Image (cartoon, grey):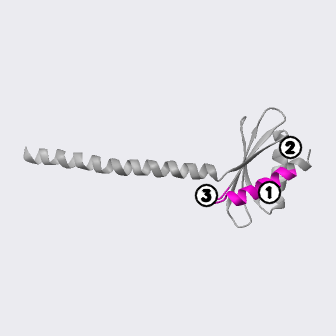
Amino acid sequence: MLKGMLSIVLLAFSVFNLSGCIFLAAGAAGVGTAKWMSDKATETVNSPIEKVTKSTKAALEDMKSSVYKETHAPDVTQILAKDISGRQVWVDLRPVGAEKTNIGVRVGYLNGEKDAAKILEIIVNKAKSWL
């Protein structure tokens, strides 16, 4: 009987002790997601998604980035590439009506906002020049 009570007390203590770790892990995941979202550079251009897709691939080629995957869905086209230094580049193209496209660029897993902004600027300029 005493052994059973001791087991219950130890189990309860463990649950309370671990729950703090779970909350800490959940908080860290939330911060990580917020950081991931803030590293994305976005802009909307006055051009249909088909043209922006072509100009995006051409801009990435001009920057010596190698496109290795392109995925199309009704609400997003995603282009994955590796930049010249080998970092991952994600470009999300979302139609905004028939004649506008939202471009979102992310580079690397952390602290890529400056590079993402540079790549976005090149993509936007290429898209505008193709109008």
For label 3, the residue is 109
Q: Does label 1 or label 3 sit earlier along the sequence?
A: 1
> Main structural element of the magenta stretch: helix, strand or loop?
helix
Judge left or right: residue 130 versus residue 42. right
**Mark 1: which secondary structure?**
helix
The residues bearing labels 3 and 2 have C-alpha atoms spaced at a distance of 28 Å
**Mark 3: which secondary structure?**
loop
Name the residue type under label 3: Tyr
Camera-nearest residue between 68 and 34? 34
Q: Is residue 111 magenta?
A: yes
Q: Residue at x 23, y 49 (%)?
A: 13
Q: Which mark is residue 60?
A: 1
Residue farthest along the top direction in this orientation: 97
Name the residue type under label 1: Leu
Q: Residue at x 80, y 63 (%)?
A: 64
Q: Does label 3 or label 2 sit earlier along the sequence?
A: 2
Residue 110 is situated, as x and y percent measured from the top left of the image, at 60, 59
Name the residue type under label 2: Lys
> Image quadrant for the C terminus?
top right
For label 2, the residue is 51
Residue farthest along the left direction in this orientation: 1
Q: Which mark is residue 100?
A: none
Tell me where the magenta segment starts and ends, as one range.
107-126
